[in-house]
Amino acid sequence: MFSWFRQNGKHSNGSTPKEVERKVVIDIHDITKMYKMGDIEVHALRGVSLQIHEGEFLSIMGPSGSGKSTLMNILGCLDQPTNGSYFLDGQDVSKLSERDLARVRNKKIGFVFQSFNLLKRTTAVRQVELPLVYAGVTGRGKRAKTALESVGLGQRLDHLPSELSGGQQQRVAIARALVNEPAMILADEPTGNLDSRSGTEVMQIFQRLNREQGITTIFVTHDPWIARHTQRVIMLRDGKIIADREIANPLIAGENERPSEAAEMEGLFKEAYYGGAKEEYT
Ligand SMILES: Nc1ncnc2c1ncn2[C@@H]1O[C@H](COP(=O)(O)OP(=O)(O)OP(=O)(O)O)[C@@H](O)[C@H]1O
Ligand SMILES: [Mg+2]
């Protein structure tokens, strides 16, 4: 049934992927993150090295507690590593002050969260204007409107979150992440709270943004179906990368039915990323 699989991310038709000279936007080397809890040291990341190119669309997977959010927070300049280096767009950001980090975030990174994080009493267009207020940009209303139109919400500008569906709320959050024209979008379980139809719509938007505007996009997800729609999957376990695979043929959102059986879903995941070795990800 899942004939579009390529085992281990390799192209099965003998062709090699095009070698395109692409800029490295994220370059981290041997990053560790240690939290001190009283006398106990929690090693959330234990030496992660990773390069991500401009325009890539990838997902980070792994069991609960494996360090996904920790890594995402570091990539998003919300937190800093204990050790190791992080170059973002050529700039060493691993030792910046809080203030400079905030500036980098505002300029280069858009965030989308599982729980939307919208303000309750604020209309869609005002929500999207907020990052522009912080950035001190003029012409905010027009830019916010354009961003909302680009996610199909041109008719919902004055709606409050309570007057929008979950999928629409997440699209407001995407518009808010986009309005500053960031170089990259980080999304932690962006479809986690959505029904499958809204999830598909949101995925379609991310795929289109990535395709048309070349926005580097990184998802954290527990959902193999979501990961199967991205171009590369990085698997974490116990604070380390245990697999990093290219997906030769990412699914296009809306073109395939999501497998209804858990076993099929498991098969989809195993075949696509692990060539059948189940114990690797349980
Ligand atoms: N602020 C913190 N202080 C102390 N320990 C932390 C902190 N944040 C995370 N940890 C610990 O670091 C490890 C990695 O946590 P992290 O939140 O990155 O996991 P995760 O992969 O995102 O998990 P989940 O899938 O449940 O969201 C865990 O053992 C966690 O308990
Ligand atoms: Mg997490």
Image: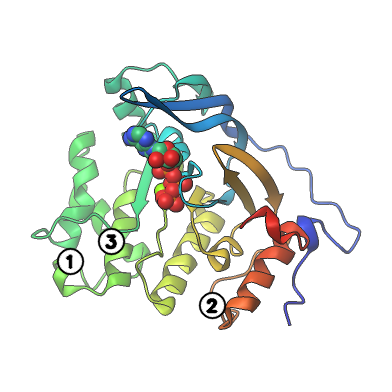
Query: Which sits in the foreground, 68 or 216?
Result: 68
Q: Which residue is mark 3?
A: 172
At x 69%, y 57%, the residue is 279
Q: Horizontally, is 26 left or right of 281 in the view?
A: left
Identified by mark 2, the residue type is: Gly
Please tell me which of labels 3 and 1 falls first in the chain: 1
- Gap in Å between the C-alphas at discs 2 and 1? 25 Å
Q: Which mark is residue 254?
A: 2
Q: Secondary structure at mark 3?
A: helix
Dividing the image into 4 quarters, which one contains the C terminus? bottom right
* Res. 78 image quadrant: top left
Q: Which residue is mark 1?
A: 161
Dividing the image into 4 quarters, which one contains the N terminus? bottom right
Residues at circles 3 and 1 in contact by the CB criterion of under 8 Å: yes
Q: Secondary structure at mark 2?
A: loop
Disc 3 vs disc 1: which is toward the camera? 1
Please tell me which of labels 3 and 2 falls first in the chain: 3
Identified by mark 3, the residue type is: Val
* Res. 278 image quadrant: bottom right
Query: Which sits in the foreground, 145 or 114?
Result: 114
- Gap in Å between the C-alphas at discs 3 and 1? 9 Å
At x 37%, y 45%, the residue is 110
Residues packed near mark 2 inside 10 Å, few (<14), some (14 to 19) or many (20 plus):
few
Colouring chosen for the image of the structure: rainbow
Look at the image and tell me whether residue 247 can be seen. no
Up/down of 228 relative to 128, above or below: below
